[in-house]
Amino acid sequence: MVKKDPKPEKSTASRIKESVDLVKKLQGLGITDSEPGLVELRGKLNEWIRDGPAWSGKIEFARYGRYVELILPTREGVAMTAALKIHPWAAKEIAEQEANKA
């Protein structure tokens, strides 16, 4: 059986570009620089940019009732994955507010 060559490590430039794009998208949604979740996210991204290991996990944005599920890969050709999700309790509160408006 012939083994495939492993994909090369993701370059620092690729990591920076993906990180900057993610932070800009979150800021575009109104998440402020002082938000503890964004501060934590930037810390994880900075570790990853400095050739840190692959990482996956959740980062809370409690003030917004949301969290980000994040996957930071180390292999070239595999994009970072970030999904901003709403907590069930926050979704319920929003639904109740919308119902009260009607």
Image: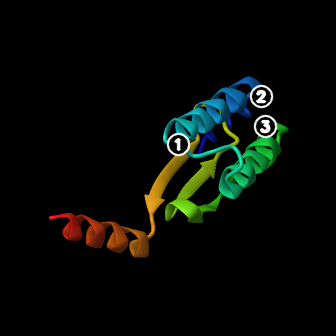
Q: Residue furthest left?
A: 102
In this view, 27 is above or below 60: above
Choose between 60 and 45: the one closer to the eye. 60
Which residue is label 2 attached to? 12
Q: Are the residues flagged by discs 2 and 3 in contact, CB closer than 8 Å? A: yes
Which residue is label 3 attached to? 49
In the shown orientation, is residue 63 left or right of residue 49? left
Q: Residue at x 73, y 23 (%)?
A: 13
Q: Position of residue 78 (x, y in %)?
A: 57, 37
Q: Residue furthest front?
A: 101
Q: Residue at x 45, y 69 (%)?
A: 87
Q: Secondary structure at mark 1?
A: loop
C-alpha span from label 1 to label 3: 24 Å
Which residue is label 1 attached to? 30
Q: Residue furthest right?
A: 50
C-alpha span from label 2 to label 3: 6 Å
Dot 2: within a 10 Å radius of its alpha carbon, few (fewer than 14), some, or many (20 or more) residues? few
Q: Residue at x 69, y 43 (%)?
A: 33
Which numbered disc, 1 or 3, marks the residue closer to the eye?
1
Dot 1: within a 10 Å radius of its alpha carbon, few (fewer than 14), some, or many (20 or more) residues? few
Q: Give the residue type at disc 2.
A: Thr
The picture quadrant where one finds residue 10 is: top right
Q: Residue at x 63, y 61 (%)?
A: 57
Q: Are the residues flagged by discs 2 and 1 in contact, CB closer than 8 Å? A: no
